[in-house]
Amino acid sequence: MEEKEDIKIPEQEERRRPGQKWGLTKLFPYQWVLGNIYFFLFLSLLTVVYIYNGHYAEKTVKNINRTARQLKELQYEYKTVKGELMMRGKQSELAKAVEHLGLKELKEPPLKIEESK
């Protein structure tokens, strides 16, 4: 039988840290990362605030658009009701409205009655 040669890997290569494969530990040494942990936490907090701000702005824009739409609808309704009121306030329209009650429009001016002393 053939003898297989055992290839031994040096101990340093066996105990690799995650990221050592791509050379990240040379670029960002462990002590440097620990020394700047507060900076990374600060950047994480800024990222969360940035995302929150984006969502808040989008929600605010939606509310503004919804309110503008409601305002336009109310303006149209106001103009319609105002026009109907102006129409009903005309003398000819009032005469038509009270005709079924038996009231009629005067054709001649009213008489003034004076009391003699």
Image: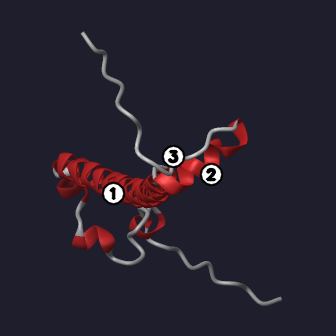
Q: Earlier in the sequence, mark 1 or mark 3?
A: 1
Asked whether residue 48 appears in the rendered view, the answer is yes
Q: Is residue 51 above or below residue 110?
A: below
Q: Position of residue 11 (x, y in %)?
A: 43, 64
Residue highlighted by disc 3:
106
Given residues 45 and 110, the one toward you in this image is: 110
CB contact under 8 Å: marks 1 and 3: no
Label 2: which secondary element: helix
Label 3: which secondary element: loop
- Image check: 69 left or right of 64? right
Q: Residue furthest top?
A: 117
Q: Is residue 101 above or below residue 65?
A: above
Give the residue drawn at x 17%, y 57%: 32
- Image check: 70 left or right of 117? right
Q: Position of residue 85 (x, y in %)?
A: 47, 50
Give the residue drawn at x 19%, y 45%: 38
The residue under label 3 is which amino acid type?
A: Leu
Residue highlighted by disc 2:
96
Q: Is residue 88 above or below residue 6?
A: above
The residue under label 2 is which amino acid type?
A: Lys
- Image quarter of the N terminus: bottom right
Q: CA distance from mark 3 to mark 2?
A: 13 Å
Residue highlighted by disc 1:
57
Given residues 112 and 36, the one toward you in this image is: 112
State which mark lies toward you, 1 or 2: 2
Q: Earlier in the sequence, mark 3 or mark 2?
A: 2
